[in-house]
Amino acid sequence: MLRELFLQHTDARRTSGHVDGAFEDIVIALLREALEETGIVVDPADVRSAVTVHHRSPAGGARIGVFFEVRRWRGTPQVMEPEVCDAMGWFAFDELPEPMVAYCRAGLDAYRAGARMGVHFQEPGDPIAYDPALDQTLLIPGPGSHDTGPDGAVCDFAERAVGRITGWTDVSWAREESRVWRAHGAEGGEWYVKIHQNQRFHQREVAALRGWVPALGAAAPRLVAADAALRAVVLTAVGGRPLHGAVHPPGEQRRIFHRIGQLAAAIHTSAPPRPGDTTLPPGKLERHLNGARPHLAPGDEGFIRATARQAAALPALDHVVPTHGDFQLRNLRWDATTDTLYVVDFERSRDGPAVRDFVRLSDAWHGRPDLQEAVTDGYGRPFTPEEETRLTVLSVLDAVSGISYGTAHGDPELLERGRRTLARLRAAQHP
């Protein structure tokens, strides 16, 4: 990934490095800067050129910025220079943190658009931080370049649903299995067009959008059209910005988390409860453990197996309810101007225990009991002891699955989240 995808300098300071003298070429400079700033070791053979930006600052100085892509490395990225870097995180191209240095944003926009080069000349008085109203980045495509829209069949499907589309913006998360575009209509409307990575996810999202999601009203997108053969959907656009990576004052955070609890309650009551139980499929844990084992800490496997035995001893559920399945800050959008919380991405939706939707959210309130209390207050009740146990069990199993998937698919965010969850839950057992 481009380095700017996981360095978040919230004070808008630089996120790039410089060649350190005539003896150092730009690849060696990249390796050195990556180690100094993030603690990771990059093999020169894994460095790929991405985009070049000719930049002029508001003060008038001009320089060439060279962006690279690195998809493999050794080590875990971490903040190594806290005096110049405030935080680190993984962000989708359409969910970049603010503020961001304007010329760094120009490089990311050029990369996302498939351009090989961008010209980013600022005027005197322009801010260092990115301001969309002042951005005048000129993208210079390479030979054979094309737009960022989907292929012809999906484009035709979308236009049959909403009319002529005059522009596409690729807003896919940095995983290759599924694709999402924001479609700009000729009459000014906006929609999202999504291609699911497999039929199972397509069927789950479509079933949710046709079934219980409409009960959420304006808090969720509406299904406009679906095509099973293409595994594609067209959805209405929702407002707000993702809560993942967002920074809010503590009081506003508590208010937002209270609303998250209310939204969770609305999801779980959007359809009548149904009889059913959820059990761990035979062999699934072993498959995940085999994939996760190289990244487990000493004692993790014993803890995981003990938790699996605890899962087998849990009483059967009397009923199951609709669950989102990936209820986390990345899929929650907050619009402060309208005081509205939105939820998106229902491809992991299925009936299950209500606490399933707090597995990934619990990572967001770790160390903040006030936020956990805000969620349960909004939800309308605290978790029962049995639900607390089930939440721990589901969290451990989800962590192992995430580590295994992250290892197999080169997804460092899932890998790190899983390891962090196991460490947190083990520490909770022995405070």
Image (cartoon, rainbow, N blue to C red):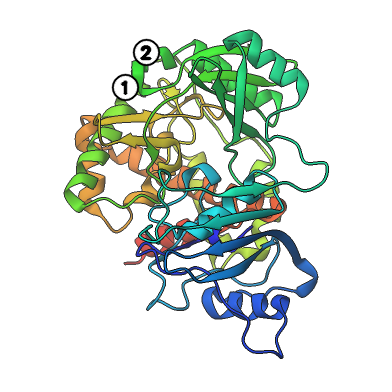
Q: What amino acid does circle 1 point to? A: Ala
Circle on res. 208 = none
Secondary structure category for the residue under label 2: helix
Residues packed near mark 1 inside 10 Å, few (<14), some (14 to 19) or many (20 plus): some
Task: Using the image as rendered, state which of residue 49 and residue 376 is in the foreground.
Answer: 49
Circle 1/circle 2 CB separation < 8 Å: yes
Q: Quadrant of the N terminus?
A: bottom right
Q: Earlier in the sequence, mark 1 or mark 2?
A: 2
Residue at the image position 51 percent from the left and 54 percent from the top: 105
Look at the picture and state if 252 lies above or below 322. below
> Which quadrant holds residue 23?
bottom right
Task: Using the image as rendered, state which of residue 401 and residue 154 is in the foreground.
Answer: 154
| Residue 393 placement, left or right of 414 | left
Q: Which residue is mark 2?
A: 215
Residue 292 appears in view: yes
Task: Using the image as rendered, state which of residue 59 and residue 82 is in the foreground.
Answer: 59
| Residue 153 placement, left or right of 384 | right
Residue 12 location in percent, x, y? 39, 63
Residue 171 location in percent, x, y? 57, 38
Residue at the image position 67 percent from the left and 72 percent from the top: 74
Q: Which residue is mark 1?
A: 266
Secondary structure category for the residue under label 1: helix
Residues packed near mark 2 inside 10 Å, few (<14), some (14 to 19) or many (20 plus): some
